[in-house]
Image (cartoon, rainbow, N blue to C red):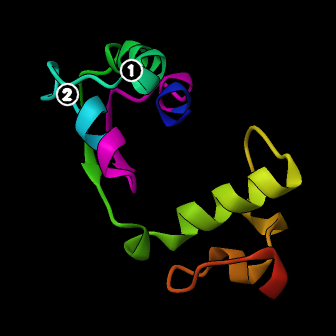
Amino acid sequence: MAAELVNSLGYEQAFFQCDNLTVTNVMQPRAAAASHFKLETAKDRFTNYCSNLRSWDLIHTPRACNFIAHNVAKWARLTNTVGSINPMTLETNILDDYVEWSHDNG
């Protein structure tokens, strides 16, 4: 989870982006009253990590504007990769911010 990584690196401030509008609405700091049963555990974990930060925010960024994050996540799921990923080990087309990567075209 990004918030966990930010904490482990000792940052005091963070700006998170998410391409899922429901997740963004439930987890952003000014959405304290928003709830979603399937997201409660993740929200608790996320806000717990964010409580260690001096300031943070979460905004919705459409997937079409952030293919790199989506492509790396898709590749990681496909290859069962967890933890830190060295970008030098990824195929170049996974890091294309303008095209959605798929295993078939990679």
* Residue 68 showing in the rendered view: yes
Q: Closer to the camera, 19 or 68?
A: 19
State the residue position of label 2: 29
Region of the chain picked out in magenta, as a range:
6-23
Residue at (78, 40) in percent of width and height: 82
Q: Residue at x 87, y 54 (%)?
A: 79
The kind of residue on which mark 2 rests is Pro
Q: Is residue 106 shown to the viewer in this render?
A: no
Task: Give the image location of residue 104, x and y in percent.
Answer: 83, 82
Examine the structure image and report whether residue 15 is included in the region drawn in magenta: yes
User: Nearest the camera: 23 or 91?
Assistant: 23
Report, in whole angstroms, how far the alpha carbon at label 2 lies from the one at label 1.
Answer: 18 Å
Q: In x, y percent, where is residue 17?
A: 36, 51
Relative height, residue 60 to residue 46 (above, below): below
Q: Which residue is drawn at 85% across and 46% down?
A: 80
Tell us which disc is closer to us: 2 or 1: 1
Q: Are marks 2 and 1 in contact (CB under 8 Å)?
A: no
Residue 12, position in %: x, y?
33, 26
Q: Helix, strand or loop at disc 1?
A: helix
In this picture, residue 30 sits left or right of residue 25: left
In the image, residue 6 above or below residue 42:
below
Residue hosting label 1 = 37
Q: Earlier in the sequence, mark 2 or mark 1?
A: 2
Task: Determine whether, in the image, residue 89 is placed left or right of residue 30.
Answer: right
Note whether 38 is above or below 88 in the view shown. Answer: above
